[in-house]
Every structure is written in C-alpha cells, then in structure tokens.
Amino acid sequence: MEKKSFAGKTWDIIRSSIKGEPHDYTQGSLTRAIFLLAIPMILELSMESVFAVVDIFFVSKLGQHAVVTVGLTESVISLVYSVAIGLSTAATAVVARRIGEKNPEAAAHAGAQSILIALVATIFISITGLVFAKHILSLMGGDEQVVNEGAVFTRIMFGGSIVIMLIFMINGIFRGAGDAAMAMKSLWLASILNIILCPLFIHYFGLKGAAMATVIGRSGGVLYQCYHLFKGKGTIRLRPAHFRPDLPLFKSIVSIAWPATLQFLIGSGSWILLARLVAESGGTTASAGYQIALRNFVFFILPAWGLSNAAATLVGQNLGAKNPLRAEQSVNITAIYSAVFMGAVSFIFIFLSPAIMRIYTKDEAVIRFGIEAMRWIGSANIFYGIGMVMTQALNGAGDTKTPTRISFVCFWLIQVPLAYILARGFDLKATGVFIAIPAAETLITLSAWYFFKKGKWKTIPV
C-alpha cells in the first residue's frame, strides 16, 4: 500500500475534523486527537471573533459614541458570557468524563440538566439588563450622549442573553462529547447570519440594529443546535426523560460550575473596571481606541481558546478512561502548539497594529491609543497561549476551584490595583491600564503551570 505524504495526512485530519467523523479520543495518536478536536474548535471560535470584529467595523462608521456604547455594553454583558462559559465548562467536564467511561446515556442526562440550570440562571440577568440599561452605561463611565443613545442597544443585548447562554452551553455539551464539528457549525451559522444582517439592520435601525442582528444570528445557531441535540445522530441525543430534575446531578454540576462561573466573573469584572478606568483617565478617544484593540485581541486569541478547549475535552475523556498520563501528555503537546501560534500573533500586534487600526477609523487620536493598547497586550501573547491551555486543562478535569483562586489573586489583587496605581498614582492614564494587562496575564500563566504540574487535578471526582 502506498504511504501517504505529510500533506495527504494533514488533509485527512482536516477533512475528518470538519466532517465530525466519530473518533475515540482515549486511544491512538495524541497529535491526531488534538487536531481533530482543535481544528473545528479553532474555526468555531475564529468565527465568533469575526462576529465581534464585524460588529465593531460597522458600528465604528456611526462614530465614537457608538463604538463606546458597544464597548461598554460588551464589557458588562461579558458577565453573561462568564456565567455561560462557567456553566458550559461544567457541562464539558461532566459530559467528557461520562463519554470517557463509555456511558453516552449518562452524558446526555448530564447535558440536559446543564441546560435546565442555564435557563434558570438567565432569567435574573435578562431582567436586570432590561430595567437598568441606562444605569449600566452611566456606571461604566459613558457620557450623557452614550447613555441616551445607547440604552436601547443595551436593552436588546441583555434581553437576548438567553441565546448567548444557550449557544455556549450547548456547544460545551458537544465539545465534551468530542463532537467539536457540530459546535463549529452552529456558531458559523450564527455568525454568518449576523454578518449578513448587521450592515442591513444598522442602515435601517441605526445602533440598535447591530444588537438586533446579533440576537437574531445567535438564535439561528441555537435552533440548529437544538435540532441536532433532539433529532440528530451524534453521540449525544436528548430525550424528554433527560430533563426530569435530578437533584444529585444538579448538585454535582453546580459544584463544578459555580467556581468556573466565578472564575470568569472575576476576569470579566476586572476587564470592566479596566474599561471604566480607561474611559475616566483617557476620555472617549482613549476608550474608543482601547475597545477596537480589544476586539482585535478577541479576534486573534479565540483560536488559542480553541486549542485550550481541545485540551479540556482530552483531559476529561482520558480521565474518564482512567488514563491520567495520556491526559497530561495531551496538555503538554497542546500548550506547545498554542505558544507557537500566539508567538505569531505577538508579531502581528507589535508590528502591524497601525495598519490594523486604520481599517476601523481615520481618527488619528483613536488610532494612537489603539496602537499602544495592541502593542502592550501583544507583548505577552505567548503567555496567554500557554496559560489558557493550562487553565482549561484544570477546568476540564473538574478542578475549577484552582483556576478561580489564581484568577482572584492575579486579577483583583494584582491587575486592578496595579492599573490604578500606574494610571492615577504615576499619572500614566490609559497607558498604565495597558501595562497592567500583560503583567497580570503572565502571572496567571506561571501559576496555572505550577498547579498543573503538581497533578492534584488527576484525582478530582466528577
């Protein structure tokens, strides 16, 4: 039989990963397993980043105040993302463990219970955003024009938070089952709908049209997910019986989810305070440049999140298969790939930031702040790449408390105070905030690496 070339093998992996062909991730080549999971996860989250960049691109044409409104709203609505990601982290950990144990029925039951928890959690968030939209923008440092013109945008985004919650939660279930291709396809559908609708709705409805396009796009993705969960032929197939409340399982999922949710809330809360500090110390111009830089950061860092999510699935499934050595090896290999990728991103952020910023705006003052923010953030991109893999590996093992403690110390005891000291005490203004970001992220990476090497995560029951 003729031996396949490297290009042929690579194409086989790409084709298999995108098609979502069934694969046992507890056996065989680890490199193949990583890329079978990572390729659709990278494509999934890359499209999520395109989602964000498309929004800010079209919104930027409406002026600085529109950009600031979207940025401030996204900073607060990242709290919704935090709850969604926290719950999906728990779903991935539990589902992956059951799949590793070769028990897809128990995996489906755990997935259904996770969805119930997500629905309950969304009610309070949606009501709060709908009622207090103006107060939220005001508290975030928005001026009177931002508050008055942006309240409708904020209300629509918070009112549609149920679809944000579900699209992340259900994709967490798919990822835990190793069906990364289905998660990819649902988010691609949501993003394509948004890309089509965003310029159209902005043209007819102004700023609120951007929010309408986002909610409608994500709703399309959720409907696609639900069809395949209930009618599809994948590893996970839900039935009504799976949704009968199971209090012991509820407790188990929540015990993993609440530290994971708190972990991301801690991070999001820190980013919210940084966004407010930039707005207060640098004004609307600095805030606009910072928000555009952050959107580009999201664009480039989400593929690394795809690699880290692959590591989480491999850890969960291999621990379920009673193979902790293979779980550890998968994380080490994935971290190397992530570091290489984020090293390339560092080059882009440091040397190509002026060209990138000019895609979005012609305002030289905004461009100057955006370039500075991108260069400071980009200086630690390799650390981001490794840190995300290590943190998600701990989460995938069900050890969500350790990354939460790391986040609390590095974000709230180091990043936020350092940003205030540099911005106010040393009068560096927005630059002080930019410096604090890579400093804290580097510490997070070193801490996560230390606890991963200690190996306690291998003994966490899920």
Image: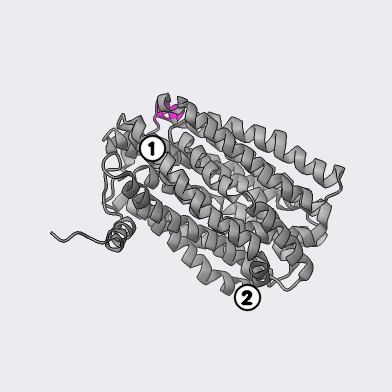
Q: Quadrant of residue 265?
A: top right
Q: From the image, tell me which residue sits under label 1.
A: 329
Q: How many numbered tags mark residues here?
A: 2
Residue shown at 62% from the left, 68% from the top: 57
Q: Is residue 361 above or below residue 25?
A: below
Instruction: Provide residue 448's location: percent of width, then percent of height.
Output: 55, 34
Residue nearest the observer in this picture, 7 or 181: 7
Residue nearest the observer in this picture, 432 or 45: 432
Magenta residues?
246-252
Our reading of the magenta stretch's main secondary structure is helix
Residue shown at 86% from the left, 42% from the top: 425
Residue 203's label in the rendered image is: 2
73 on left or right of 93: right
Instruction: Provide residue 74's location: percent of width, then percent of height.
Output: 64, 54
Instruction: Provide residue 288's location: percent of width, then percent of height.
Output: 73, 61
Q: Earlier in the sequence, mark 2 or mark 1?
A: 2
Q: Is residue 87 above or below residue 301?
A: above
Determine whether label 2 and label 1 are within 8 Å by CB: no
42 on left or right of 181: right
Residue shown at 58% from the left, 33% from the top: 447
* Amino acid under disc 2: His
Asked if the stretch drawn in magenta spans residue 289, the answer is no
Q: Is mark 1 on a helix, strand or loop?
A: helix
91 on left or right of 232: right
47 on left or right of 150: left
The answer to whether residue 90 of the structure is visible from this angle is yes
Work out which quarter of the rendered image holds the N terminus and state it: bottom left
